[in-house]
Image (tube, helix red, strand yellow):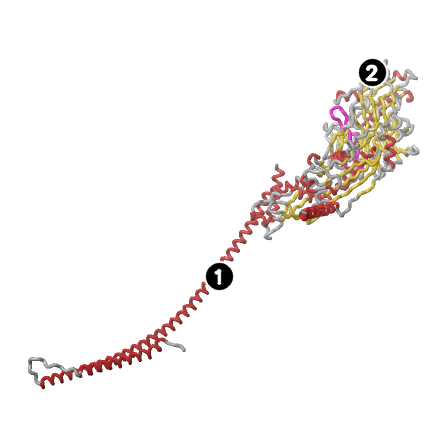
Amino acid sequence: MPRRPRKGARPIRAFVYAVLIHVAFGAMLGVTLWVQPRTLKPIEGKPVQAKAIDLAAIEREKQRIAAEKKKAEDEKKRKEAEKKKKKKEEQERKRKEEQKKKKAEEEKKRKEEEKKKKAAEEEKKRKEEEKKRQEEEQKRKEAEEAQRQQDEQDAVSAFGAVAWAIQEQVRSNWNPPAGDFNGMSVSFTIRVDRDGNVTSVAMSRGSGNARLDESAENAIYKASPLPIPSEARFYEYLKEFEFVFSPQS
Amino acid sequence: MTARIIRHFAAWLLLSAAAFSPNAFAKLTIEITEGAGSGIPVAAVPFKWTGNGSPPEDIGAIVSADLYRSGRFDLLPPSDFLSRPSEAAEVRYKDWRLIKAEALIVGKLTRTGEDQYDVSFELLDVYREKVKTGLRFSVKGSQLRQVAHQISDRVFYEMTGIEGAFNTRIAYVTMQQNDTDRTYQLMVADSDGHAPQQILKTTNLPVLSPSWSPNGQWLAYVSFSDEQSGANVWLQDIASGQRRRVARIDGSASAPAWSPDGRAMALTISSSGNTDIYVMQVASGELKRITRDPAIDTEPAWSPDGRYLVFTSDRSGRPHIYRAKADGTGIERLTKEGKENAGASFDPSGERLVMVTNRGRGAGYQIGVFYLATGRTDVLTDGTLDESPTFSKNGTMILYATKMGREGVLAAVSADGRVRQILKLHDGDVREPAWSVSR
Amino acid sequence: MMRRFGTIVMVLLLGVAISGCAASKKKGGSSVEVEDATIGSTTDSTASGLGADDTTAGEIIVVEGDSQGDLDDPLGQRVVYFDFDSANLTPEAQRVVEAHAQYLASNPGMAVVLEGHADERGTREYNLALGERRANSVSQIFQSLGVPADAIRTISYGEERPVSMGQDEGAWSLNRRVEILY
């Protein structure tokens, strides 16, 4: 069963206080009872009027009673006060408790809210970051694309710079059959590896003369490896290209 | 160098046009417009000989020499060969790709009897790694050179699509002079100059204008009987050596030319100071006059279809080439350019003439090819006294006479003028070559 | 031990099998054209005529020609010369020819041979005809001056009998000639 410490504490405390109070009263009563039979010794030397002594005693008694009363009233007051205090305390406590509770609730709420807020913030942040990331991604892609295009242009440009060397290397290995082949032409699609070794040769259009076609194909094999540009980023764009043989006799 | 820069620039333009096109990635293309200018690289491996001592003939060497002489092949030096296969099964194609041979010739020569030999040969495509063709022969020792030439013919055909002309013979005249006399010999040899045989020998009586019969069995030629007679035409059977004069003619006869069917002969007859073309039926001797002009008309030659004759005539003032139908009608002048043109004969296709041409301005006499369709003349040689050109039977080579210093020698030039070679055949003066169409 | 031996044998057999496969691959399934080509009968007959037995061809004809004609020409000049590619006589040549013509005309029964020649430029057959034309042009003058035709014989040697072997105009001009021989 749920136990709230305050609530649980209160009956015990109340009990304890009650006991204490009873003990206190009892004690006081006891004290007073014990104290009362004590007789006062006459003070030597002086004849004391009995009446005067009694008056004093009565005064004292009165005082005592008054004091007691006072005491008791004080006590009562005190008790009341205490009670009040207690009550107040209790109230205070309650209040405080409630306050605490409230506070706790509020705190909880606050925390929840904070949590929510935080979550929301985080979400926002995350979204923002996501967005940022996407934007960056986008930028990166664009940059990549731009780089790719640049690479491609550079590759083509680099290829162009060595095209004459490739052309010459194939030309110097080409021994076409004798004859007039003016106007005829045979084309091949070539693949090379990164070192320029020819890895595949496919005739894309024949000239109609098998010996001319074969001689051109032989020339490509003999010219391998070809002096393609060696930069790694160019390879993607240069790994396949065309040869067109158009003898002009 | 300039041409290189231009090519570089052109290639670059082609590529940049491709690169900057709207399509992100157009195809890179390189154009090649000419070859190395050398022949097809071929490796001819010495034929394997399993007998004792040296082989009776070095077949691989004969084939290599034939192919080299045609001007169309680069024969790779045997010292570069990494292996010496004698048949397709033994070939490691990588060895031959290393030296960039496009074709490989391998073979074997084996003695199978007292005078009996087996020859086998294969022609291989190195980059496609397959056998293109092969032949096997069983022959006598005396026929081994012919076998080699037949192998050359087969290789030539496979590589070029044109029939080979290596298994043919040539006739030519030699002249040797001492203090008092000139000795003439009419010779027949293999087309590579080997195995020359004497057909005729004379002292102080010139020999000219040999002409082969289409079946290769007869030679017609011009010579003199004695000091009192003018030139005459003889027909001689090469195998037996028997000969006869063409006909008793009043005057002189010369410039014999067998018709493509071997039944007729065109020739020049001079009588009463007039020199004209006649056609004679070989069997009967019957003569038909073809030209009647008072000018010199000589040197007739038949078109391959036998329908036309071309000849030399100076009826315009200087010698030029004319054409007539075989019956003498329809005479028209063919050569319009140059100072003089003479000694024309047809190529086997009938589309071209080879002739002696003089372009004037001190150019001298050179060998030219005349294209009937266009009238254009290509000059193939640069001598000063080049003459008697004769086509090979496949129209790819021209044999002719030229001078090396004071000495007359024979030379061969490819019909496109690219390759020229001197044939060192004999001591003394060599002239008047004629190329047979059959063996 | 046996096990190891067995392994080695297996490896060897495997190697043989692989190389066998490679070899048969090289033989190629495609067309190996192997013909039996025997040399035809024409070759045999030719061979027997000129063949490897080293005997020279058939009948060898050795024809001896007479040496040059005698030199005791009473009229001195027996050679007349011509311009390149021409059969026209120079006036000097004309005079010589006429002298001989008169001699012949006044000596019936004398026969004369006119040998026509050309320099080496141009083809041999054309030069044969040119020599013929030159000899003939002298013959025409003879006949026009009364020499009977049957007393005259013309022979052309074209460029085949040069008197000068040089390859310049000096030599050529000496070879462009007609010789008057009795």
Horizontal placement of A132 versus B126: left or right?
left
Specify whether residue B95 is painted magenta: no
- Return the mark for residue A130: 1
Q: How far apart are the two marked residues, 1 and 2, measured between alpha carbons? A: 124 Å
Q: Quadrant of residue B115?
A: top right
For residue B314, say whether it is visible.
no
The image position of residue C14, as x and y in percent, is: 70, 48
Q: Quadrant of the C terminus of chain A?
A: top right
What is the residue that sits farthest to the front in this orientation?
C1
Residue toward you, B80 or B384: B80
Q: Residue flagged by tag 1: what amino acid is it?
A: Glu
Q: Chain of mark 1?
A: A
Residue toward you, A16 or B246: A16
- Return the mark for residue C77: 2
The image position of residue B247, as x and y in percent, is: 91, 29
Does dot 2 land on a helix, a strand or a loop?
Answer: loop
Specify whether residue B404 is painted magenta: yes
| 10 Å crowding of disc 2: few (<14), some (14-19), many (20+) | some
The stretch in magenta equals B386-409
